[in-house]
Amino acid sequence: MMPGEISSAYDEPSASWFAKATLLWRAHAVTVLVVVFAVSFAVSTAGIDGRSSYYPRFLLIVVFVAAALDAVSTVRGRAAATDDSYVPPRGLREVVTRNKRTLLTVVCLLAYWLLIPILGFYASSLIFLFAAFIALDVRIRVIVVLAPILLVMFYFAFTVFLGISLPIGIWI
Amino acid sequence: MSGLLDGLSLLAEPSSLLMVVLGLLIGFAGGLFPGLNASALAALVLTFSLSLSVEGALILMVSLYAGELFAGSVPAILLGVAGTPGAAVTLLDGFPMAQRGQARLAIGISRMASVVGGVVGTIVVIVLIGPFGDVALYFGSREMFAVAILGLFIIGTVVGSNPAKGLLAGVVGMLCATVGLDPITSQPRLTLGLIELYDGLPLVAVLVGVFAVSQLLVMASAERQVATTPPETALPAQGVTAQGTTMVASRRGVLAEVSDGIRTTLRYPRLLAQSTAVGLLVGILPGAGSAVAGYASYGFAKKTSKHPETFGTGNPEGIIAAEAADGGNTSGTLVPTFALGVPGSGTGAVMLAALYLHGVVPGPQVMETHRPEVYAVLLGLLLASILILPLGIALATPMTYIVKLKPGVVVPPVLLLCFVGAIALRSSYFDVGILIVFAFVGCLLKFCGYPVVPLVLGLVLGPLAEDNFSRSLLLGQGHISYFFQSPVAIVLWLIIAALIAGAVRKTLLKRRAVV
């Protein structure tokens, strides 16, 4: 294998099945998802007749041509990604280790989204800030000072100054 | 001429001047922090800019763009970390200069070249946009449809190294633009039975999700942004420590840096003109951002230089080529954005979204109906380009402190800001869900090596393409041949065909290179 052809690493017998699967996913996931998306679009516009159906049909042709071109480019050229320095993880544990902070931030983000309608914007924001700062290894002393200051700034900027109505929640 | 004077009076209002300064400050902060690019920042301020006038919102965005492009060069020179894609070109010669103990001179050159590129480029655009807009008025619906498709193909083939991936991202954006009710039959398309999607995808939530939140999630796993440390031997002479982050500049030192930077930069008038022109021309191409302009200008400068062998080793010409092109590119991107309604960059796409949200339909008619506002925005960019010099000097020291911030301190508050931005526009909790979904879409595209900008440009170009497609069909009484019955349209379709052929050829050549 030539240097820089990391994307074809799944040809190597020594590569783990997880690494191979990650590279395959990286190479083809978007093309597959786009085709699924386009098929859904075709189904949802199937009942449209006459001139109104021309644009969806035109768009579908463009989508399938682009997807085919992408698939050809990926399969034949093994151009899985522009970043050839990508080294696939060998297991789920490595995925978590590499992206620990991002994954924790995503968890905080989803929890925050679920909490907003219950606790309201400001209470859930305070919890989110504490949780996200901790997840990103910010020192507790900094968090205790920074989080309330940020919320006060947000309150004056958005509620008082800009008059934006933010969710108040059912409990608070 | 009256449009220009009206634009000047709009810019002279205190609120507009305040937006220039505010935009520059936000841009400086974003440019210093790798990852937070101008598109993400513009998407972030989009919701809040709705309380401003249309020209105020756009002035804020162009100033932010100009500030971000300049500030991105500071960490590139000091630390070898590119804050923006364009700054990666500045880094090639800026960082070696810093390593040689000429960090301040390199920053001075970059500041002056950026100012000259921005000012000259904007003046050229102010002169050209009037006639350009007048010509664009002769574009009918079939030509505008071809322009939208051309924009998509240019974006797809220019952004990123793989045209197929760029193109696919662009058409996905166009597909996303079809979500909602069919404009003619009112039949729901891709709404998943959700009534909230009948009006289409909320543009702000999508933009903030794709540009800002996805980038913040990527940044969350990044270590301290000062990833590389310059060698100890070279930098302390210029007041930069081994960590490369504490360049505490004395007033006299800063002024000496400015005068040295000005003198060195002005020693290369031909290079300045050439690089500004390259940046301007690349900017006019839809989707071709500052990185493309920077590399094109750098390559051209190297070819025409008397000392091409010194490029990449700390040649001031390399910095001038990159920064002047950046400055020219900023103004160039506004030409297709305003004259055709086709975004010239990711930030241009957010600006078009701002126009939509202010009730202005983008397209050639904007130059007719909102000419003073367009000139006010261009003059605002001119002022911002000039103000980069004094503001950059005044904020030299605080800027070095921002570079030191850990991503962990920045990511949560900015995420909070993204949430407020998504909720505020329609007071809709549903929009936050869309924001999260598109943040994941952005992350997936980045992980798989697809450019994100074409997706957003496709989303913005989608309605323009569909409206003009439907109108052309009506005018042509359903005959597809109508799309090819004007010389301008034929030329546009031929260019599209050439781009497709080029993309296919590039794909096949790649295969041959690998084999």
Image (cartoon, coloured by chain):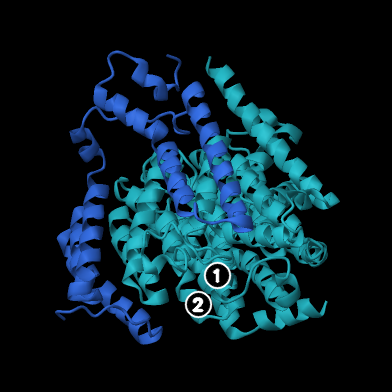
Residue B203 picture location, percent across and down: 47, 64
Q: Quick check: B291 left or right of B118? A: left
- Residue type at mark 2 is Leu
Q: Earlier in the sequence, mark 1 or mark 2?
A: 2
The residue positioned 33% from the left and 68% from the top of the image is: B430
User: Residue B148: in sight, yes or no?
Assistant: yes
> Is B231 above or below relative to B261?
above
Q: From the image, tell me which residue sits under label 2.
A: B50
Q: Are marks 1 and 2 on the same chain?
A: yes
Q: From the image, tell me which residue sits under label 1.
A: B354
Do labels 1 and 2 touch, CB within 8 Å?
yes
Q: Chain of mark 2?
A: B
| Alpha carbons under labels 1 and 2: distance apart | 8 Å
Q: Colour of chain A?
A: blue
The residue positioned 53% from the left and 14% from the top of the image is: B515
- Viewer-side residue, B136 vs B252: B136
